[in-house]
Amino acid sequence: MRAILNNIKGDKVIWAVVLLLSIFSILAVYSSTGTLAYKYQSGNTEYYMIKHLGILILGFVLMYLAHQVKYKYYARISQIAIYASVPLLAYTLFFGTNLNEASRWYTLPLINLTFQPSDFAKLALIIFVARLLAKKQDEVEDFRKGFISVMIPIVIITLLILPANFSTAAMIFTTCLVLMFVGRVRLRYIAILVGVGIIAFIMLIAVAVNMPKLSGRFGTWQNRIESFRSGDSEANYQVEQAKIAIATGGITGKMPGNSTQKNFLPHPYSDFIYAIIIEEYGLIGGIVVVLLYLILFYRAIKIVIKSPRNFAAFLTFGVSFSLIFQAMVNMMVAVNILPVTGQTLPLISMGGTSIWFTSIAIGIILSVSREIEESQEKDIPVKNTEHVVA
């Protein structure tokens, strides 16, 4: 154990935040899966907690391994990962198993977990775009050599995800736009990419309307947006139950395990777990969770500022922004600021691949932090002007 602790490097505050979020996760998942346990596991309420604990432990292992890898190698790994993600997404789009109204590909049947290629593709794309932006800093203002080469993978990946999972595609697209802005891409080029995205979405809607067999997900998006705008209680059943959970939580909450809305919310352990946290831990607990994510982002930005190379800076920013953006979307859905999206709360919601890829993402941030610390210990000057070579 001491040897492992001695090998844990990187930002200690981030490690602490991850640990605290994991504790929230274990408590909230254990509390919110009671109905699920009585329905599918003959009342064995420990089943889902033990399963989730195992997933979190493996997540910590993946995080530890990821933070031990030199961050420059992720530039090379992304070149393979981005090409692998295209056939995975295409296969899932046409042949994936339908789960919770979105295509999923089952690859881990022995432990009853599903593999979501979109999680893999999201991380691969962010790293790949960070690599391209760092490599092309001298050409980033050139439309053909700089912008087009960055735009192509973004468009391909988001278009493959869009039909099955609009919210994930939109979040990936937005993350890449912000990353391009940070990477000094001209605003008018980014505006062109936004226009391409809007046109592609309109074309998809047109195809869905004229081809009923392909209109299933479009109907879901339409219903969710219309229900959100109308405020109809019957159509917004999930949101109404989440509101009740938040309202009855008060300032200090009902205390752990005393949630009642977990018996009414369809997915209290994933999409609406933040509502359960507020119900049991009150406004105080909800604010603490928000602050933990903001602290994580703040520490990531500090790493960005200290990063020795452009790739390290773009990589850290892209990965951290993606995680915090997803967390904020999940929490805004729970408090009825956004329509229902189906996005999980990173490191807290029950899940398999979502937690594992989140853990790898945080491990990558810690990898950059570790190398900065090692450079400072050796009194190596840190410069922000070098380009990645990969």
Image (cartoon, grey):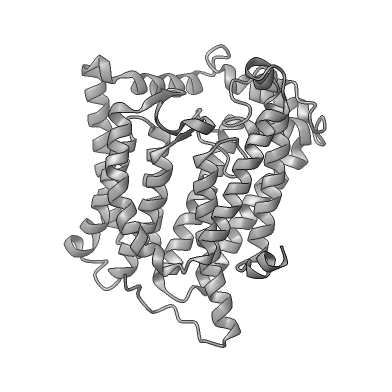
Residue depicted at x 40% and y 54%? 178
- Please state the horizontal and vertical placement of residue 201, each as a whole percent of the image: 28, 33
Viewport quadrant of the N terminus: bottom right
Q: In the picture, residue 148 is in which quadrant?
A: bottom left
How many discs appear?
0
In what quadrant of the picture does the C terminus appear?
Answer: bottom left
- Rendered location of residue 384, percent (x, y): 44, 78
- Extreme residue in the front direction: 110
In the image, is residue 20 above or below residue 35? below
In the rendered image, residue 211, in percent from the top left (x then y), is placed at 22, 17
Figure check: 93 above or below 153: above
Residue drawn 57% across and 88% down? 379
| The furthest residue to the top | 234
The answer to which image quadrant residue 349 occupies is top right
Q: In this view, does 338 lie above or below 63?
A: above
Residue at 26% x, 44% y: name it.
156
